[in-house]
Image (cartoon, rainbow, N blue to C red):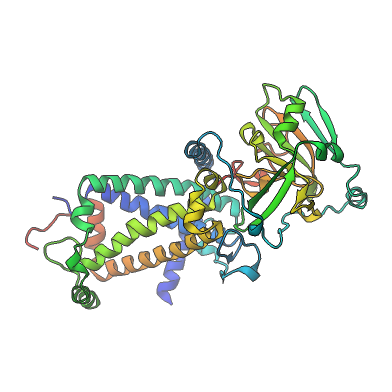
Amino acid sequence: MKRHALGTRIWHWVNALSLIVLFMSGLNISNAHRHLYWGQWGFSPKDAWLDVVRFPGWATIPGTYSLAAARDWHVLFAWVFALSLLLFMLTALVNGHFRRDIATRWKDWTPSAVWTDVRAHLRLQFDHAGAKYNFLQKATYGVVLFVLLPLMIFTGMAISPGTDAAWPFLLDVFGGRQSARSVHFIVAWALFAFFVLHVVLVLLNRPAKHVGEMITGGRIDEAA
Amino acid sequence: MKRRSLLAGLAALFTAGCSKIGDSKAFAGLVDGAEKLHRGAHRLIGGRRPMAREFSLADVSPDFRGNGNKDIDTDEYRAHVAAGFAGWRLEVRGLVDRPLTLSMEQIRALPQRTQITRHDCVEGWSAIGQWSGPQLSAILGMAGVREEARFIVFRCADDFNGHAYYESCDLDDAFHPQTIIAHQLNGEPLPVKNGAPLRMRIERQLGYKHAKYLTAIEAVANFDDIEGGEGGYWEDRGYQWYAGI
């Protein structure tokens, strides 16, 4: 049996590309109005809860400030991101990936079990018999898959005046368009933090093996 | 520091590649497709005629930011301001059965709609204001839009470096009940910075669609012979024509 199903592998890389494009084009869009607000409205720095730095060209798509071009990238890859996530979730529900590899049990949540896991992580010991992922990995993937990624989609929709007209409840859920925009920004950085952590942990722990497995699928080692 | 510059270098390489792709014809086609998909999805999930949310007076923002052109630096416009826009005229022309020229008095005498709505700029900010004016559908009804017309173009008195500002929408937005020609903001005549004496409200789209300093409404079959041919001043400069996203 393969360690990673074909659907998971394809989604992983499509999603990685989408998130990088969305993040970097999003930084270009952020440069258009570098203030964040809570509530329905906000247009003046004096009402902002955060004044955002100007992101440098090397971090943005395109590499110079262009709101029009950045929006083109953003609204195109929004579709790639949202549709591939939907497909992946349906597949993972059907093939048991979520139930088998991501779902946690109540006993995993006891402080002593979590602490054991944290200490193992700090010692850079990632091997865990029986399951594919340990508790911290399951919890992190769970939060990313079921909280952060969907939040990006729904806050993104709440920023769009066309979606707001069609689905006005989005404004109630997030407490206004400017609140949704703020949450969109915060969650984008939370995903960036996940991205950094994810890449660093792979680099610290047999990177060639792990990246290779995410391409070829690898094998589940029965002896482990 | 070395690792950080490596990361920055990788990002810069990636963004340079993206800029190359971004300039290609194929990418432009994909982007147009994505824009149409968004528009179709908005129509699909909202049903026949979704309405933009209307707020209460308590939600109105203390100021309504003026953006883009906030005044028109011509003797003609200054004379209009001095005269309280008594001589301002709105033309209705193009593919219509009965071309019209409406005075401000005639516009104010039409049935009025008042709505408190949120204005979303493409830059990201929002303001809430109360707008009053006749529905565009009423004026188009008076003029009689011909069958071959597919879009309504809005002509404006302002320009950027000699390039006239203009905008357009499809007939779905043109006949939408919340699409009005506003002559009042928060119960007062429209301020100069917000487009006096007349501006469009197209509530399900971003701010650049809401043409200010309105002089004419034109029914057309396509945008081929109008300015850059993309259906609006900002559209001619790369922005999406469907600005509901």
- In this view of the protein, which residue sits in the foreground, B234 or A56? B234
Image quarter of residue B98: top right
Q: Relative to A217, is B160 on the left or the right?
A: right
In percent of width and height, residue B205 lies at 61, 45
Residue positioned most to the left:
A223
Q: Relative to A52, is A109 on the left or the right?
A: left
- In this view of the protein, which residue sits in the foreground, B5 or A121? A121
Residue at figure coordinates x 20%, y 72% from the top left: A110
Image quarter of residue A150: bottom left
User: Is any part of residue A189 visible from this angle?
Assistant: yes
- In this view of the protein, which residue sits in the foreground, A157 or A62? A157
Quadrant of image for the C terminus of chain A: bottom left
Image quarter of residue A65: bottom right
Q: Is residue A9 placed above or below A59 in the rendered structure? A: above
In percent of width and height, residue A67 lies at 59, 54
Residue at figure coordinates x 55%, y 39% from the top left: B50
In percent of width and height, residue A117 lies at 20, 73
In percent of width and height, residue A25 lies at 51, 56
Q: Is residue A131 placed above or below A46 in the rendered structure? A: above
Residue at figure coordinates x 63%, y 45% from the top left: B203
Q: Relative to B188, is A92 on the left or the right?
A: left
Number of numbered tags placed on the structure image:
0
User: Is any part of residue B165 visible from this angle?
Assistant: no
Residue at figure coordinates x 56%, y 70% from the top left: A49
